[in-house]
Amino acid sequence: MSLKIVVIGGVAGGATAAAKARRVNEHAEITVFERGEYLSFANCGLPYYIAGEIKDREKLLLMTPQKFWDKYRIKALIRHEVLSVDRVAKKVKVKTPDGSIIDEVYDKLIMSQGAMPIVPPFKGLPAEHVFVLRDVPDMDKIDLFIKTQNPKTAAVIGGGFIGLEMAEALMHRGLKVTVIEKAPHILPLLDDDMARELVRDMEQDYANTLTILNAIGASEMGKDFVVLENGQKVNADMVLLSVGVKPEVALAREAGLEIGVTGGVKANGRLQSSDPDIYVVGDAAETTHLITGARLRIPLAGPANRQGRIAGANAAGAHLTYPGALGTSIVRLLNKTIGYVGLNSKQAKDAGFTFFTSTTRDPSHASYYPGATTVITKLLVEEGSGRILGAQVMGENGVDKRVDVLATAIYGKMTVHDLESLDLAYAPPFGSANDPINIASFVAGHEVKGDVRTIETFSEADFLVDVRNPDEIQKFGKLGNSVNIPVSQLRDRLHEIPKDKKIVVYCQKGQRGYLAYQILNQNGFQVANLKGGFLQARNTN
């Protein structure tokens, strides 16, 4: 008899698992049960359809049951809900669209049920103008509401990836949007300084259409307003809830599978659950972090696809291993793109790493070629070894390729010294002779090698030297009681700097400060360079 593989759930993880199982085993009998009406859809594309950037709704529907059968000879049944799993008899009980109950036996079972949006117990729920976004029907409801009700204001509860994508989408549709985030800042995975810079830029560039409220939660939904925890009312003709997701593990729990510390179904490296004949993938799977080895769930499409591929292959007879995830993420918010990979500062500290951070600001391509914008690159670097533990990148252009390079570097356990010599593609429209990745590694490499002493707060200085030009000070302001000595004049004005005090030098972003450090250090001064210069000090001091 042929191997019987049953997959619970379609979309990214389940559909990928089924397709890979077929490629590994042409003779297996493969059945997919999907309780929704769409077997596989581009859930990451939903906000962009609402925004109007994706015009053709059908392009979001990636695979139909008929196409799945024609291409893979896989039986995919939509509107079929699996009610229970009998591990002893190795069968699942399924409710069909007409309400009847059927049993389906399996040799190998793959569970890919995903996660459900969390709906907090706000007063005033449920309400017709309050939405979540998980699937195509949710998308259709939001789109129809905007078209028929013509809302003018919206509140997005939650400033994570989906929340910000939906804030942007609603702004594209002409709404004034307020993002309400209970954590200290939006995008909680970012370090505080990077998030503060993002919020400051948004408040400056979109002051009339976007409001971001941090460190405050909502408590009540009114007909056209949201009440915050402090009693403040925010105008909102519609509300989008995006406060996180919870894994769908009821079936797994009832079947007696082990639930991990994160609330997901615990999986080993082959993505087997505590039952070796049952595999688990996607948002409901608890796997490991590639750097720390800690248990985690990462509700992202990329990991779900790769987990599905590995679980499907293994269920069909292969022996593949999932190495763990880095949580590589990217999101666009209007004119800014923000990318993240590896550990942030809190995670690195909690994991016991001794590390430092380095922040650099460089043009996205050659500065003399039109259209260059600033790319901010923050690296988390292990002290001593120089290994890269994490990175955060933000800018208007070129963020994606830098994040991907850094994700590759972290996966390969590369150090900043490796990145210094990385031979990246260069032509003026695309990059610089020294890419922002190279420059970030130069700066961090100096610190690893002890070529420079840096300091994160200028308050520790006995004597603070601003080495920028006077016009920059007039335009941007200065820090504390700093004395302005432009770096071009520094060698001729050493006599103005006391040798018996702790000197801190700074420029706009750190490069001239490094040169000033070398001049003073090699002339016998006790000196440190302010990390990241004036622009970084705005975020950390």
Image: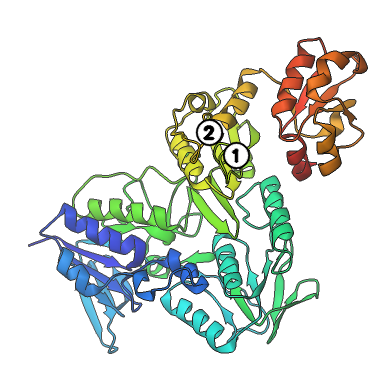
- Picture quadrant of residue 176: bottom right
Does 337 sit left or right of 517 as displayed?
left
Instruction: Return the residue found at the far left.
Output: 1
Q: Is residue 24 visible?
A: yes
Identify the disc placed on residue 363: 1
- Picture quadrant of residue 156: bottom right
Q: Dot 1: what SS?
A: strand
Which quadrant does the C terminus fall into?
top right
Q: Dot 2: what SS?
A: loop
Identify the disc placed on residue 432: 2
- Residue drawn at point x = 58 percent, y = 66 percent: 168
> Which badge, 1 or 2, is on the more N-terminal residue?
1
Which quadrant does the N terminus fall into?
bottom left
The percent position of residue 481, horizontal first and vertical second, equals 92, 34
Question: Which amino acid, by three-letter code, is at mark 2?
Answer: Ser
Question: Which amino acid, by three-letter code, is at mark 1?
Answer: Pro
User: In the rendered view, would you say 72 is above or below 368?
Assistant: below
Nearest the viewer among 116 and 532 is 532
Instruction: Return the residue found at the far top.
Output: 523
